[in-house]
Image: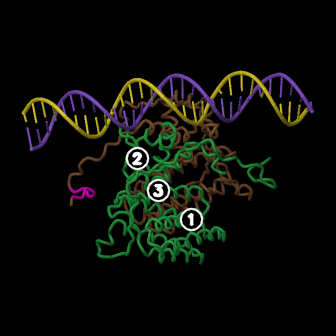
Chain colours: A green, B brown, C yellow, D purple
Amino acid sequence: MPHNSAPAGAPAFLRVHRPSTVDLIATELRNAIYSGGLPVGSPLREVEISRQLGVSRSPLREAAQRLVQEGLLTAIPGQGLRVATVSEDRLPDLFEARIAVETHAARILIRHNDAGALAKVTAAFDHLTEAVKGTDARTIGDADLDFHFALVEAAGNTRLTRYMSTLVVETRLASFSSKQGYVVRRDVTPSHQAIMAALKSGDAEAAAAAIAEHLTEATARMTGELAERGIEVETVAGAPEPGAVYELGPIDHTSNPAD
Amino acid sequence: MPHNSAPAGAPAFLRVHRPSTVDLIATELRNAIYSGGLPVGSPLREVEISRQLGVSRSPLREAAQRLVQEGLLTAIPGQGLRVATVSEDRLPDLFEARIAVETHAARILIRHNDAGALAKVTAAFDHLTEAVKGTDARTIGDADLDFHFALVEAAGNTRLTRYMSTLVVETRLASFSSKQGYVVRRDVTPSHQAIMAALKSGDAEAAAAAIAEHLTEATARMTGELAERGIEVETVAGAPEPGAVYELGPIDHTSNPAD
DNA sequence: GCGTGTATGTTTGTCGACAATATGACATAC
DNA sequence: GTATGTCATATTGTCGACAAACATACACGC
């Protein structure tokens, strides 16, 4: 009985991956939402967006449905599509999902005991510690989310990675939706250090606990619970992008982006 | 300052939820894949499917992109859409994601200590124990997946529930993709009983461990590891649906399905 | 005989256009 | 002055059609 699942010797050729037009558009939309180019709650008019992207409405609408499935866009029948808003009362739901994904990713990472994978997380952590030395809220916020994504990515699970890439954007959306504006706390490093230490020591339960605590604390801070209880946290504020309509780059489905 | 987030007294009116046409089509496609009406790996020809559904190609393609995002359909640029195949080597990835979602759902469920939520899980469990008395593999398989979904749903997290609804269909796809045909093991009850017992006793760690063990064992069985090691498990086989092209029901976007 | 090149048929990817619907402004009645 | 009804505008939802790309079958050359 011939089995084709185990590639012995020559790995033959893996299927070439050519990104389709909808792939490109979907990525462009996600980036626009993540960067704040498409403001939260704003309706995206299809003719305008499609012309900016240099495509027709059909591929745009198809790509948009992918983001609807992710929860990044909300579709109301007669009203079209809007950028999703993550209101304060939905923050616990979001961060609970992050806890589920990130804690288990940490467990997998420790179980695999892969030095290369851990090195990538360490690199992201170093990049974060470097970013907090500055004062730009966006740079810090990006580095923070990059670290958390790197952690999940290092686990090597395709589905968890896919979930996390969406959760990252949703977290950013929550920051944009916040009525206190886009704010990141100043001392992000300590709690991250606890996570890194647990990861390096190989203590899965400690890592999971550190992650859960870190994210629970973040939820409390963003919902304003800490402020209500009189607890002050040093923060850095920063507007996403003052005025200026974000110009989405044109999609070029002829050339190969891997040049 | 008026706050509209906390509904005190009259809950006013919640936004009416009218399912769009793409919603209906997407659900129809998921059901068709779950039930085996659309066989694994089969390319879905758009003109044919769209005519069966009584709609045009545009809304069908938009709905299909949602399933692509879920991973239920794979899109290759020049070749169109195919029903995804979950080959044996991808089973660990799938079940590891299930472990992440289900174990954390159990932790949430125990933390909330909601009797009503636990009752629904118990009901699904009872339904499963009833199903295994019969010999129909599909009935048992449905009850099994229903139980796991009920467990996650009981946690009350919208994102985890959304993840799980996709994972359920992916698990079914894996069963269909198996070269040993659609097979379920005969004695599903014992390991499920361990999960239920832990849930009722309120022991989160025990529940998580039971779920992880149960799913890890399921992975080993489906990858054929047990058979290779000479371990026999009593199973029940059943074909998804002999021949006969599945006829998708026509979409009616005029009437209200909530009648 | 095996491999390569060519031609045909089918399916996809994209586009422009039409009809239905929702939004906002305006006028009117109470 | 407030509320209701009506109209105009803009945007969406859907459709049919065209062009490009792929898969299959066949013929040709080595």
Q: Which residues are magenta?
A: B2-8
In the depicted structure, whether residue A96 falls above or below residue B52: below
Q: A240 or A184: nearer the eye?
A: A240
> Who's the residue at 43% across and 38% down the image?
A47
Q: Is residue B84 shown left or right of residue B62?
A: right
Q: Do the residues marked 2 and 1 share a common chain? A: yes
Q: Do residues under tags 3 and 1 come within 8 Å of each other at their CB atoms?
A: no
Residue D9 or residue C30, whichever sits in front = D9
Find disc 1 in the rendering and name its residue: A150
Numbered label tally = 3
**Counting other residues with Cα less than 10 Å from the Cα at mark 1, is it few (<14), some (14-19), or many (20 or more)?**
many
Q: Secondary structure at mark 1?
A: helix
State the residue at coordinates (52%, 77%). Answer: A193
Disc number at residue A250? none
Label 2 sits on residue = A74
Q: Distance from label 2 to label 3 (Cα)? A: 16 Å
Q: Which one is nearer the viewer's eye here, A56 or A190?
A: A56
* Quadrant of the frame with the C terminus of chain B: top left
Amino acid tagged 2:
Thr
Whether residue B187 is in magenta: the answer is: no
Instruction: Give the vertical position of B182 relative to A137 (above or below).
Output: above
Disc nearer the start of the sequence (2/3)? 3
Q: Residue at x 72, y 49 (%)?
A: A14
Q: Residues within 10 Å of mark 3 (few under 14, many from 20)?
A: many
* Residue A220 in the figure: left or right of residue A194: left
Q: Nearer the viewer, mark 3 or mark 1?
A: 3
Place residue D9 in its image quadrant: top left
